[in-house]
Image (cartoon, grey):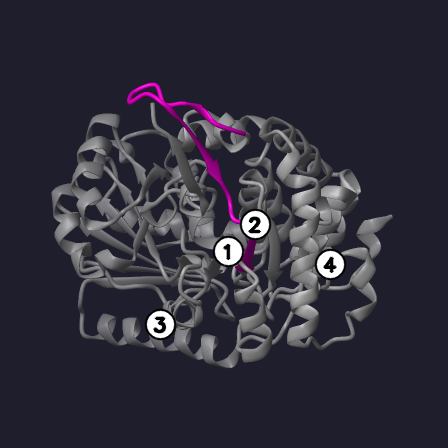
Amino acid sequence: MIWRDESPWFLPGEVAGRASGSLSSLVVTDIAARIWAARDAYLVRLPVAEIVEIVDCVVGLWLGPESPWLHAAARRIAAATPYSEAMVRTGLTRLLGGCRKEALLSLLEEELGDPGVLDGFRPRRAVGGSHRACGPALTTHIFSGNVPGLPAISLIQALLVKSASLGKPASEELVFPAMFARSIAAVDAKLAASVAILPWPGGDPAVEQAAFAASEAVVAYGSDLAVESIRARIPAGIRFVGHGHRLSFGVIGRESLDTGALDSLAERVAYDVSLFDQQGCVSAHVLYVERGGGVPPESFAARLANAMAAFERGMPRGEVSLEEAAAIQQVRAEVELREVREEPVRQWASPGGTAWTVIYDDDPSFSPSCLNRVVLVKPVTDLRQIPSLIRPFCRYLQTVGVAMSQERRVRLAEALAPLGACRICAIGDMPHPPLTWHHDGGFNLLPLLRWTAIEE
């Protein structure tokens, strides 16, 4: 079966033999021309409704406990990254499970109103006349390797707007992009001919410039430094979408501490913190807990520590570098020193290692975690304190997981929206934004589109 091919490359059949481990600018230019031509011959002619059906079939290959695609990806990604097979399997299942037909149609309707504008001119009801949208003939994707599976979202979005895709996987995670492209070929080989995955060395100027010059759009994921470096190298006139560094946190209102489901709430917080070891932009760094509930914030921190230990038993944290382990040990040592000074701090930590750490700190100021399952629990007297606490980090804000009444949730969202928070969700859902979310505060398909109008 196709999924047994373990190469990190996915190329059009006629040039597959050139995948020798190195690329030249001429080969990249040739591959780009081939997938562009394949797109013009097939993808661009497909009705968007048919593309949705094909993508839904592709995603279906990955779902279910007996899926050979899921099994192979979990095994290979776990062997190449710090993540366990169980964690990879859970993450991929949740991520791809959110890409079924209903979600794809919702995304198209949410952003375009009438998805038919991708197929031809459609009426502009409010102003008269008609218009249509065209996606890039070719999009180059620069993937990051922090969370396995995310390249699927970028590739699916490009397919929906009828764009060929040239993908560069991250050196930390070479497995998934090519596997997902092969799953497309397993459903529709002609559609997959519009996709190429090329693992060239980052920063190779000749190869990179050939890829960018052949593209009409570039989508890049990574650190702020990496994204801005790529942006500076994009030729004028090419659309660029960059997703850089972001921070997320959680908030628990006092009313949620009065229920009999505190252990369940703690388990959901542990999930938000621990999945993929806080490497995702949607992972919680800090948990604000409001005073005045059924249990004090410090007591909830103790429950969270129990939940973190339980999560570790089911999905062990991946191996960390010496530098990462030293950073965790330094954070723990600083808390211990503050405890000796009788400051209002306390910590719970995994015995015999750095697998997880919960720190209760009476100082409510926001401070990013050093990652790898280190979470800070901070009390607030009132939720209205939170906007001023996170204001210094507003340019990095992304997801806020909450547990509180709907009325207070809306009030908090109103206060956080001007500061840059782009997603308010339930605790336990932080690692899994829906396809329709406003990624980094923007849209997903619209930045890739060019519009043409016929005036009445």
Residues drawn in magenta:
120-141
The residue located at (66%, 46%) in the rendering is 39
Q: Which residue is mark 3?
A: 332
Q: Which residue is mark 4?
A: 10
Question: Residue 93 appears in which quarter of the rendering?
Answer: top right
Per the model, the C-alpha gap separating discs 2 and 4 is: 19 Å
Q: Tag 1 or tag 4, which sits nearer the N-term?
A: 4
Q: Nearer the viewer, residue 273 or 117?
A: 117
Helix, strand or loop at mark 4: loop
Residue 43's label in the rendered image is none
The spot of residue 332 in percent (x, y) is 35, 72
Q: Nearer the viewer, residue 450 or 346?
A: 450
Q: Which residue is mark 1?
A: 216
Magenta stretch: includes residue 320:
no
The spot of residue 391 in percent (x, y) is 17, 56
Q: Which residue is mark 2?
A: 137
Q: Is residue 254 left or right of residue 92?
A: left
Question: Residue 148 appears in which quarter of the rendering?
Answer: bottom right
Q: Nearer the viewer, mark 3 or mark 1?
A: 1
Up the image or down, 63 lies above or below 83; here it is above
The amino acid type, in three-letter code, at marker 1 is Glu
Q: Tag 2 or tag 1, which sits nearer the N-term?
A: 2
Up the image or down, 28 lies above or below 97; here it is below
Q: Tag 3 or tag 2, which sits nearer the N-term?
A: 2
Per the model, the C-alpha gap separating discs 2 and 3 is: 51 Å
The residue located at (68%, 77%) in the rendering is 24
